[in-house]
């Protein structure tokens, strides 16, 4: 019995994978970034760089099981499933000398040792100007289920992968991995055992006309046999208009084949401010399954799962996230760097029949304001003025998803503040200056709040109504990803390294 099989069997006896593995971004489908893991570390040392290689010297770390080298910029939160750790990065520190220059990379490591098992290499998307920003790499956290990993590549493709890679041969039906790994003007290469095994590809640019802006990064949601994917359709390179207003914001694919089943009925058209980088969430509302997605129009939509035989999902309700919409019937939408419009870049979190989400001005533009909202997930139609349960106006710009645990909401703002609010009322309990910018989200686990920042700082705080900093840890690189807890270990991905912190030696 191999390690992955042994792990799966043991976890099944202990009550299922969800209390141990972390096979997608967030808690189950709610997107709540909390974990039931216990025995997690409250201290570690990130170590020092090797003077020659630039790698972290493991001998200089403390309470770290292993460190793996990533690329030069890592924006994808790790996921852990079946004895493997998956993380998207770029190719600035090539593992494969055949893959040259800027490219998207998805790495798969052995959970026990940190050894690289295989990688997916994806050339740049050159057909869409500014559609695949320099060195961004693969930004999508994979979703892993039943031996398959589903991920959105930097080329705006939905790709289904065999989690064993090419080590067990090419499983097909896709068999042209050697062509897919390199740009069109380069000769195909022969895949080896440390290359990814692609089972199928759905090209959202080629098949739906999607025009992503800067990055394609959705964390795919699986519901039954279907995949729900935000397309990242956005504005063209001048920021003045939507490149393809007819392209969908959401697509629904058959998880077994990649076939398009349905798309959204949001009808955003020209009303996208910048890009669309939200991921769908799911919850049960009064016995009814609903999905939730924030959009580049600044609206949050709730919709039903794709019905059999229909090529559209059905919107149940919408919420206009611009604060002025609470009192104004018409709020003009603006394009360009000076826009005062609002959008959703964080993921909505479903919790106790409520949606918790930030609506903010764009961190990449000049706006600096935002607010955090709690919305009643029940209802239908336009919930803009009848669905808001409470609001918190002192947030500022925010691209972070909230963590909700024990009646408290923890949410970080782009300017470096970590806010603790009452989940029922929105009352603020404390605000911690963590130092900005904050691109990542919080993790609540084992009575602690974990958060990394772009100032090479990792914070460990005690969860609760009183601000209590346990540790401030100096990292060797920026942290733009969300920490993950799985199987007694805390995983922290910096821009250049992946740390497995704590756990049994």
Image (cartoon, rainbow, N blue to C red):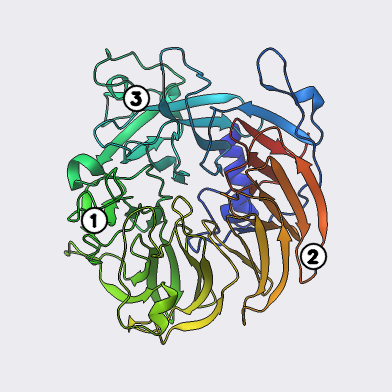
Pointer 3 or 1: first along the chain: 3
* Residue assigned mark 1: 248
Q: Is residue 357 above or below residue 114?
A: below
Tell me, for residue 440, which label it has, or none. none
Residue 467 is marked as 2
**x and y, in percent, of residue 183 in the image:** 29, 21
Q: Are there few (<14), some (14-19), or many (20+) residues within 10 Å of tag 1?
A: many
Rendering quarter of residue 221: bottom left
Tag nearer the camera, 2 or 1: 2
What residue do we see at 28% from left, 50% from top? 235
> Which secondary structure, mark 3?
loop
Q: Which label's residue is closer to the chain start, 2 or 3?
A: 3
Q: Which residue is mark 3?
A: 170
Task: Give the position of the C terminus as an image quadrant.
Answer: top right
Q: Farthest residue in the bottom direction?
A: 386
Q: Secondary structure at mark 1?
A: loop
Residue 472: x %, y % from top left:
79, 47
């Amino acid at each position: 019995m191999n390690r992955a099989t042994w792990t799966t069997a043991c976890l099944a006896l202990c009550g299922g994978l969800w209390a141990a593995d972390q096979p997608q971004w967030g808690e189950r489908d709610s997107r709540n970034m909390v974990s039931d893991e216990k025995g997690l570390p409250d201290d570690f040392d990130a170590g020092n760089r090797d003077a020659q290689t630039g790698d972290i010297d493991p001998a200089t770390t403390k309470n770290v099981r292993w460190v793996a080298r990533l690329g030069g910029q890592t924006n994808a939160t790790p996921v852990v499933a079946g004895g493997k750790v998956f993380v998207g990065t770029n190719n600035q520190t090539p593992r494969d000398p055949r893959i040259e220059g800027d490219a998207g990379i998805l790495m798969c490591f052995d959970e026990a040792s940190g050894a690289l098992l295989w990688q997916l290499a994806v050339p740049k998307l050159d057909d869409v100007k500014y559609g695949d920003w320099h060195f961004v790499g693969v930004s999508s956290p994979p979703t892993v289920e039943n031996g398959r990993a589903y991920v959105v590549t930097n080329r705006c493709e939905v790709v289904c992968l065999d989690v064993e890679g090419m080590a067990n041969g090419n499983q097909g039906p896709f068999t042209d991995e050697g062509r897919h790994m390199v740009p069109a003007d380069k000769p195909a290469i022969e895949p080896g055992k440390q290359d990814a095994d692609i089972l199928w590809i759905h090209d959202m640019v080629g098949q739906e006309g999607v025009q992503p802006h800067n990055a394609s990064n959705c964390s795919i949601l699986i519901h039954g046999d279907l995949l729900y994917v935000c397309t990242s359709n956005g504005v063209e390179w001048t920021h003045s208009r939507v490149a393809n207003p007819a392209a969908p914001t959401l697509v629904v694919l058959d998880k077994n084949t990649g076939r398009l089943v349905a798309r959204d009925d949001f009808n955003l058209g020209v009303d996208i401010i910048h890009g669309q980088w939200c991921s769908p969430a799911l919850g049960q509302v009064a016995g009814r399954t609903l999905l939730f997605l924030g959009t580049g129009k600044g609206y949050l939509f709730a919709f039903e799962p794709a019905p059999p035989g229909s090529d559209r999902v059905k919107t149940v309700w919408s919420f206009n996230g611009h604060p002025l919409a609470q009192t104004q019937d018409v709020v003009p939408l603006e394009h360009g760097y000076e826009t005062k419009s609002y959008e959703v870049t964080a993921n909505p979190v479903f919790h106790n029949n409520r949606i918790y989400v930030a609506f903010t001005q764009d961190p990449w533009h000049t706006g600096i304001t935002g607010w955090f909202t709690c919305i009643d997930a029940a209802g239908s139609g336009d919930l803009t003025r009848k669905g808001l349960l409470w609001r918190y106006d002192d947030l500022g710009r925010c691209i972070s998803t909230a963590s909700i645990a024990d009646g408290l909401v923890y949410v970080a703002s782009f300017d470096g503040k970590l806010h603790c609010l009452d989940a029922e009322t929105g009352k603020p309990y404390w605000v911690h200056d963590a130092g900005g910018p904050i691109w990542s989200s919080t993790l609540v686990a084992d009575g602690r709040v974990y958060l990394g920042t772009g100032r090479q700082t990792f914070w460990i705080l005690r969860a609760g109504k009183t601000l209590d900093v346990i540790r401030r840890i100096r990292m060797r690189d920026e942290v733009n990803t969300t920490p993950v807890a799985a199987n007694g270990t805390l995983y922290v991905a910096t821009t250049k390294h992946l740390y497995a912190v704590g756990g049994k030696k």
